[in-house]
Image (cartoon, grey):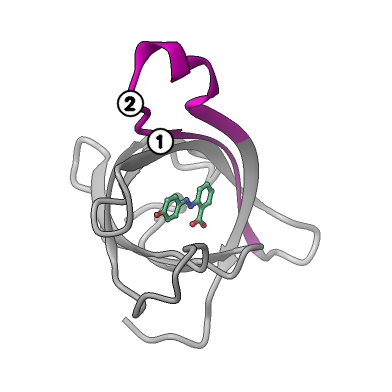
Amino acid sequence: RGKCNLAGWWQNELGSEMLVFNANSKGNFSGEYYTAVSSAQKPIETSPLRGSQHLDEDGKCTFGFTVNWSKFSDSTTVFVGQRFEDHRGQEVLKTGWLLRHKVNSLHDDWQATRVGTNIFTRLNCKEE
Ligand SMILES: O=C1C=CC(=NNc2ccccc2C(=O)O)C=C1
């Protein structure tokens, strides 16, 4: 597992957490996303994520992954980004995302996709 190992626990600035499993030899990985964002205070449930990363050895791999918010709402978020180490050597995932929520008619398609950015940092307190 080279320097670009994304496996483990991450947290974004919204307080959402995700557990990423080890990528296979093709760079494909899966994981579980625990959103801090949900209208109703539903019990924290996990949403599945699936993604793909580059396995370059310099530790600055690019990646993308999709979160299916199946349990919460008929919507999907795709994240795309890159791993960096900051000046303190802390790992950071700089990402952009698109959130698509289901709309009932083609006429509403214009308002169905939101865009934003997220920064994920490692959650060291959690074990595997
Ligand atoms: O039912 C839902 C629907 C959409 C959601 N979007 N979360 C996000 C969308 C973009 C970036 C981060 C998050 C997050 O949850 O951290 C979460 C639960």
Q: Quadrant of the C terminus?
A: bottom left
| Residue at the (46%, 53%) spot, across then down | 3
Q: Which mark is residue 21?
A: none
Q: Position of residue 62 (x, y in %)?
A: 49, 34
Q: Secondary structure at mark 1?
A: strand
**Magenta span includes 3:** no
Measured along the vertical axis of the image, is residue 127 above or below residue 71? below
Q: Looking at the figure, which quarter contains the N terminus?
A: bottom left
Q: In the rendered structure, are the residues bearing label 1 and label 2 in contact, judged by CB atoms less than 8 Å apart?
A: no
Identify the residue at image location x=27%, y=39%. 27
Quadrant of the rendered structure where residue 81 is?
top right
Report x, y in % for residue 76.
35, 39
In the rendered image, the residue lying farthest to the top is 107
Instruction: Please give left or right for residue 64 compared with residue 15 in the image.
Output: left
Q: Is residue 75 left or right of residue 80?
A: left
Q: Closer to the camera, 56 or 109?
A: 109
Q: Nearer the viewer, mark 1 or mark 2?
A: 2
Residue occupied by mark 2: 104
**Residue tagged by mark 1?**
101
Q: Amino acid at mark 1?
A: His
Q: Amino acid at mark 2?
A: Asn
Residue 72 placement (x, y as % from top left): 32, 58
Element carrying mark 2: loop
The residue that appears at 24% across and 51% down in the rendered structure is 70
Mark 1: C-beta under 8 Å from nearest atom of ligand 1 = yes
Q: Which residues are magenta?
A: 91-115
Which quadrant of the figure has residue 22? bottom left
Q: How many marks?
A: 2
